[in-house]
């Protein structure tokens, strides 16, 4: 029973904060489509910010304190739940441009 609960939790929460991870983020996140909380902050991810439009259950996204560049894609969180606000932290990166609607609400 406990093993099943642990695996189920891993499918919904991923926390890699401050793990010295490097490289670029993948363009798509389909294998994580049921994830609720994705915390990748305080690593050394670099490159452009991908869209997270396939994460239909996402409520928490932390990409803070990385080396991400470019603009926030217009379809950044298109599939996120509309019934609840999504907590997003993109601070301390080198992102440019405007925050796309509806993220600016």
Image: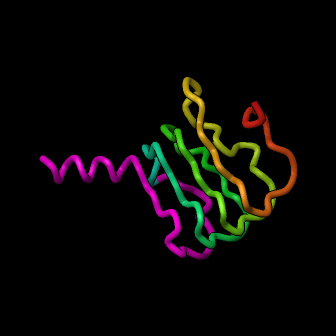
Q: Is residue 92 left or right of residue 34?
A: right
**Residue visible at 32% across and 48% down?**
9
- Provide residue 33's location: percent of width, then percent of height: 46, 46
Task: Specify the segment rendered in magenta.
Answer: 1-30
**Residue visible at 86% across and 45% down?**
98
- Please count the marks in the image: 0
Q: Is residue 14 left or right of residue 50?
A: left
Is residue 11 found inside the magenta-colored segment of the image? Answer: yes
- Provide residue 84's location: percent of width, then percent of height: 55, 27
Q: Quadrant of the C terminus?
A: top right
Q: Is residue 89 above or below residue 68?
A: above
Q: Quadrant of residue 92?
A: bottom right
- Provide residue 45's location: percent of width, then percent of height: 63, 70
Q: Is residue 16 left or right of residue 23?
A: left
Q: Is residue 33 above or below residue 65?
A: above
- Provide residue 6's location: percent of width, then percent of height: 25, 52
**Residue visible at 55% across and 31% down?**
81
Q: Is residue 101 above or below residue 36?
A: above
Q: Quadrant of residue 44?
A: bottom right
Q: Is residue 76 left or right of residue 31?
A: right
Is residue 52 found inside the magenta-colored segment of the image? Answer: no
Residue sitting at the far right:
97
**Residue visible at 66% across and 63% down?**
65
Residue sitting at the far top:
83
């Amino acid at each position: 029973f406990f093993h099943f609960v642990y695996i189920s939790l891993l499918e919904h929460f991923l926390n890699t904060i401050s793990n010295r991870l490097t490289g670029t983020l993948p363009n798509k996140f389909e294998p994580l489509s049921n994830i609720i909380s994705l915390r990748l902050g305080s690593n050394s991810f670099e490159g452009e910010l991908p869209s997270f439009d396939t994460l239909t259950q996402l409520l928490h996204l932390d990409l803070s304190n990385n080396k991400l560049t470019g603009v926030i894609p217009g379809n950044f969180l298109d599939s996120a739940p509309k019934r609840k606000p999504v907590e997003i932290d993109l601070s301390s990166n080198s992102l440019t441009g405007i925050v796309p609607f509806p993220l600016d609400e």
